[in-house]
Image (tube, rainbow, N blue to C red):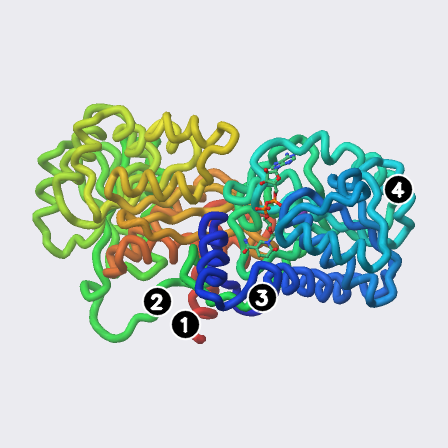
Amino acid sequence: MTGQIPDIVTTAQMRALEQRAIAAGEVSGLTLMERAGEGVVKAIIAHAPEANRAVVLCGKGNNGGDGFVIARLLAARGWQVRVCALTAETLSAGQIPVGDAGENARRWLAAGQGVYPLTAEAIRDGLSEGAVLIDALLGIGQSRSPEALLAPVHTASAEFTRLTRVAVDLPTGLCSDSGRWLCDAPFRADLTVTFHAPKPCHMLAEGPEICGALEIAPLGLRPEPGIPLITGPLCNLGKSGGHKFSHGHALVLSGGSGRGGAARLAARAALRIGAGLVTLGCPRAAIPENAARLDAVMLTPVDTADDLATSLSDPRISALLLGPGLGLDARAHALVDVALRDTRPCVLDADALTLIAGDAALRAHLHAGCILTPHGGEFARLFPDLSARMRGSGGPSRIDAATEAAQELGVTLLMKGPDTVIAGPNGRCALHAALRERAVPWLATAGAGDVLAGLIAGLLARGMPGFEAAASAAYLHASAAQVFGPGLIAEDLHEAIPQVLRGLIAH
Ligand SMILES: NC(=O)C1=CN([C@@H]2O[C@H](COP(=O)(O)OP(=O)(O)OC[C@H]3O[C@@H](n4cnc5c(N)ncnc54)[C@H](O)[C@@H]3O)[C@@H](O)[C@H]2O)[C@@H](O)CC1
Ligand SMILES: [K+]
């Protein structure tokens, strides 16, 4: 997939787009199916230029209908094509289903072609080394395990080592909206050709692992806004003129002696990303330790809620961060309480999230300037019911769950994971997908989350709105890891940020 990636559309959005175009008389379902088949054939030829033999696995629905179009178009190019269909028996008995898929089955049969059953033997006999195996069993309509359906496919294809496996729209065994597998052994594609726009499963959770290369075939439908992929910072990061106070002042609150590392990582990140000033607020007893480890970050004693209130009387403090290394004691609770009664932008991470999860009174003070950055465990503590639903079959995707959670709390929420979902209080959502060169597994290292929280706080301090700050920080965080590469530890992220910024600001 190259060039500008269109917004992601959910299954419901895709069906609505198609239905609207058909209802408006702009296009027929049959034409859409033909275009879908043409797109897949074009991608197959580009991907496997030497191939001239295919087995097309066709299901009962419209994904199967696409399969019959693909079979017809490949056969017209001189390919040796075998269709193995779930409907082989009824089709062979002359019973053609109504609808677009039925019409394409009819056209295939009318061309004098046969339809084989979906058995291991029939599939194997249609294949040879170098052939293309096309999965048109199930598409966006799948919601339950297709294990039985796939068993003969796995048995047959295991006998070959050089097949090109192509998924039509999405691999069978993958939930289109959540990216979760619907069975233990889904179809594993080398190439997935989807239509109009990527679906969440191509970007989320375990989906990318089984999609292979992703191609998007146009259907001629009008583009509509969906869920954008974050492919760069959402605001200008350059600095022009002014003095240090023109670029904001972030206040990071830390725990006691021996617990300051996480907050120091966050504070340095806030400074690196361009906040004019960053102050670390820690208990008086922890000042020597922090002073020995920090130079450009300033220090202020914050032992009590009153101390924090005094710090906040400085109107130049433009953003707060609480959580990394904050602790879960009474002081930490009191600091979160004071911070939330203030209306300044506030990042809540780590221990602050645990405190909020356990106290409805704190939760009640959350406001639209808050940015919560939970990982899976913290999300489960904050939203046990939603989290349990996510784990269930047919449950909400990470995109849907983050959107629901952000709206429920009226905050911006950044859900951490290999794919990072950012959801705003008004239903806005964006995704940073860990795909290909943006997959940075070495970010799974102690302290990386603290750096991310610090980047958000720094951008907030500079005046960036919450959603933009969270989305931009997710991008910059992954970019820094990408620039540094293997062996990364959290401290290295700070050192890589200038290189990332140089690249972005130069453009
Ligand atoms: N929506 C659109 O805009 C377009 C859709 N097209 C194709 O149509 C597909 C969607 O078609 P359908 O809605 O008919 O859905 P599918 O073809 O994905 O599934 C068909 C039916 O199979 C059944 N099913 C689900 N899980 C099953 C399982 N495990 N075992 C057996 N049967 C199962 C369900 O009843 C489902 O409705 C898309 O993925 C795409 O390939 C294209 O033709 C072009 C346009
Ligand atoms: K499929």
Q: Quadrant of residue 340?
A: top left
Disc 4 marks which residue?
124
The C terminus, quarter of image:
bottom left
Q: Is 271 situated left or right of 394 in this image?
A: left
Q: What amino acid is labelled 4 in the image? A: Arg
Residue 505 is tagged as: 1
Q: Earlier in the sequence, mark 1 or mark 2?
A: 2
Q: What amino acid is labelled 2 in the image? A: Leu
| Mark 4 residue's CB less than 8 Å from ligand 2 | no
Say whether residue 484 is visible: no
Mark toward the viewer: 1 or 4: 4
Residue 3, above or below 375: below
Q: Residue at x 47, y 67 (%)?
A: 222
Pointer 1 and pointer 2: residues touching (CB < 8 Å)?
yes
Q: Whole-Å distance between the Cαs marked 2 and 3? A: 34 Å
Residue 151 % position (x, y):
77, 32
Disc 2 marks which residue?
237
Q: Whole-Å distance between the Cαs marked 1 and 2? A: 7 Å
Residue 357 % position (x, y):
29, 28
Q: Is 43 situated left or right of 452 in this image?
A: right
Callout 1 crowding tier (Cα within 10 Å): few <14, some 14–19, many ≥20:
few
Disc 3 marks which residue?
218
Q: Secondary structure at mark 4?
A: helix
